[in-house]
Image: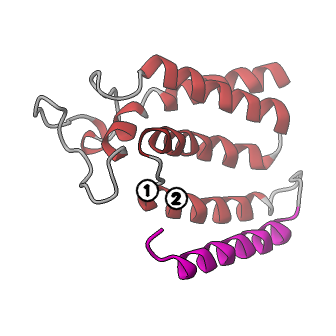
Amino acid sequence: MTALLVAGAALWGAAAGSLLPRPAHRLGVEPDQPWRSADPEGRPFTGPARGWLGAARGHGPATPQVALLTGLVCAALAATTGARPELVVWLLLAPVAVLLGLVDRRVHRLPDVLTLPLAAAATVLLGLAALVPGHAGSWTGALIGELVLGGGYLVLVLINPAG
């Protein structure tokens, strides 16, 4: 059962990872720049989700490498978590976390358009997973930790608004 779970998670990660190079390229811009809407030759991005998903056309991270990385991350999550309800949440959030890493590697920043929804989704989805029998951990404790961490980040922003 565990091997099947890990293999399924790896396939999910590889499939999701194959869609990440284009958003990584589009979001990988300096803070004051708009997101890319076309490749360097001026061809507008088209395809799934209004051109947000797919290969980066040679100007972003390589699709096979990103698919492999995301597949490995999801497989590792499945191997360490096992068949528990929160695994579904981790597998849904892992590709977005990989995307954040790709953007951060490129321009050393994390776009709010990804981080804020990711934090909200993690809170809600893990709260729902905590209602399912067989979950591990304490959702209440995690929520308190999340609020403390968010408060710490708020203090940092108030100390230095320019970042």
**Amino acid type indicated by mark 2:** Thr
User: Which quadrant would residue 48 be assigned to in this image?
Assistant: top left
The residue at 25%/39% (across/down) is 51
**Residue to which mark 2 is pinned:** 115
Residue at figure coordinates x 76%, y 71% from the top left: 143
The amino acid on which the numbered mark 1 sits, given as a three-letter code, is Pro
Name the residue at 17% across, 38% down: 38
Closest to the observer: 120 or 88? 120
Query: How many numbered circles are shown?
Result: 2
Q: Main secondary structure of the magenta part?
A: helix
Could you tell whether 48 is left or right of 80 in the image?
left
- Mark number displayed over residue 111: 1
Residue 89 drawn above or below residue 118: above
- In magenta, the rendered stretch is 138-163
Q: Is residue 157 magenta?
A: yes
The quadrant of the rendering that contains the N terminus is top right
Secondary structure beneath disc 1? loop
**Residue 1, can we see it?**
no
Between 134 and 105, which is closer to the camera in this rendering? 105
93 vs 16, left or right, is: right
